[in-house]
Image (cartoon, rainbow, N blue to C red):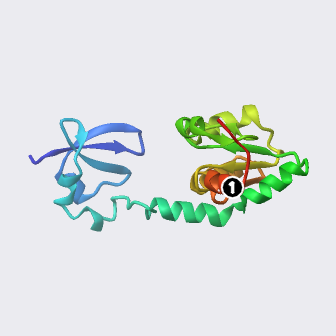
Amino acid sequence: MGAAVGAIDLAHGAHVTRPLESIVAGRANTLQMPMLAGLPVGHIADQYDLASSPDVPQSPSMKTAQQLIADAKASVTEVTAREVQDRLAAGVPLVLIDVREQNEWNLGHAAPAQYIGRGVLESQIEARVARDAQVVLMCASGNRSALGARTLLEMGYNNVASMAGGFREWVASGGAVAD
């Protein structure tokens, strides 16, 4: 008998161990993964032509971080730091949220901003900001805020934007900074 693999039986939700040869033969309703000492071992699978097996699921195309950011920026509204400053000066009610890391916030942040880190945005936003509020997210350069804005759109926040250029642009355009 050859090497053993762990598999998840998709029809029954059970973990089973099968000979490696069963991967090559293919098994309906089973997602197979080579295992060694109970851990998945990708290079064992590389020794067999699993990609050509019709019963082995193919992974969806993967994107780079830059592709994800570009997709997010294409799907959300971006505003400039100057536009946000003008709206705030005109008394437009908007919620400015800084999604940078806590240490970045501690070094200085836009004075009117409140802090909700990108890592906890989805879990904290609902308790702090109404879905119908006008929300502008900012980070250091506009990338994390675009990703966050896209997520908020998916959560039903329909009036959300990302600040292009982020905190760097806020400072460069003369925005008020707090420590």
Q: Residue furthest left?
A: 1
- Along the viewing direction, whichever of 73 and 170 lies nearer the viewer: 170
Identify the residue shown where x is 85% and y is 53%: 87
- Residue drawn at x 29%, y 65% is 51
**Residue 150 visible (yes or no):** no
Q: Residue at x 66, y 34 (%)?
A: 124
Q: Where is residue 139 in the image (x, y as percent from the top left)?
A: 61, 49
- x and y percentages locating residue 67 in the rendered image: 50, 65
Q: Is residue 42 left or right of residue 60?
A: left
Image spot of residue 101 (x, y percent): 54, 39
Q: What residue is disc 1 on?
A: 162
- Farthest-out residue, top: 127
User: To which quarter of the image does residue 11 belong?
Assistant: top left
Given residues 115 and 157, the one toward you in this image is 115
Q: Observer-nearest residue: 144 or 130?
A: 144
| Image position of 41 (left or right of 133) | left
Q: Is mark 1 on a helix, strand or loop?
A: strand
- Disc 1 residue type (three-letter): Ser
Quadrant in the picture for residue 4: top left
Q: How many numbered circles are shown?
A: 1
